[in-house]
Image (tube, rainbow, N blue to C red):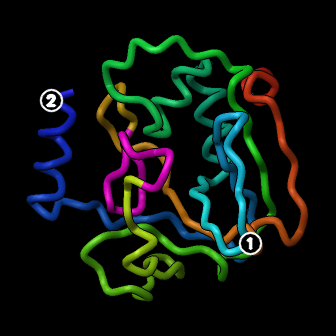
Amino acid sequence: MIAAMLFFVGLKGANACDASFSATPESFQVAWVSPLNQTVWLPNDRIEVVPLFELRQWVHDSKADAKGLLHHLGMLSRKSKKKIKASDYKITIFDIRRENLCRPIENEEPGRLFSDIPVCLEKENKSKSWGHRHGYTGCGYAIDTKTSTRSVDVYRIRWADASSQGFCVFPMQRFLDGA
């Protein structure tokens, strides 16, 4: 844990964010990974999502299990000894429009564009309010907490915008089996 903390302190202290992002299509699918009991209460609540294609590709290439996936998304600490059951998590998939997303990048002007997606407002950038706090970088992407490497780009989106075209919820195990 200390090594991971030093890594993140060094990362933020040196302003070492890698601001290179892939081009983002106007519409695409994203995934929200969350515990079964986590829900959204208000339409304006924001959730943290990742590109579905990249996530599925990583799961397929790495033959990931539930714990590996949570590490990849930064949802577990580096040295987590917690036993993870895939049945305790769900993956919600949305068809979204790029214009509804923002990037959680700290120390950048809100609204500044990175690959056609604006930086989130300051209050939307707080790491402690998000499920991915262990791998939160404040750079618009997560850190795989097992390997300490950059993993997937992360976005924030209002529930009302994400769910406007419908959504599909999968048990994590089905997602892992089908990826």
Sequence-wise, which precedes: disc 1 or disc 2?
A: 2
Crowding at mark 2 (Cα within 10 Å: few <14, some 14-19, many 20+): few
Instruction: Name the side, left or right, on which 162 lies relative to 45.
Output: right
Q: Position of residue 20 (x, y in %)?
A: 37, 65
Range of magenta residues: 129-143
Disc 2 residue type?
Ala
Q: Quadrant of the C terminus?
A: top right
Instruction: Name the side, left or right, on which 77 lies relative to 166.
Output: left
Q: Which mark is residue 3?
A: 2
Residue 109 in magenta stretch: no
Please tell me which residue lies in front, 77 or 51: 77
Instruction: Name the side, left or right, on which 164 lies relative to 78.
Output: right
- Residue depicted at 90% across the width and 62% down the height: 166
Mark 2: which secondary structure?
A: helix
Disc 1 residue type?
Pro
Q: How many marks?
A: 2
Q: Position of residue 131 (x, y in %)?
A: 50, 45
Say which quarter of the image contains residue 141.
Answer: bottom left
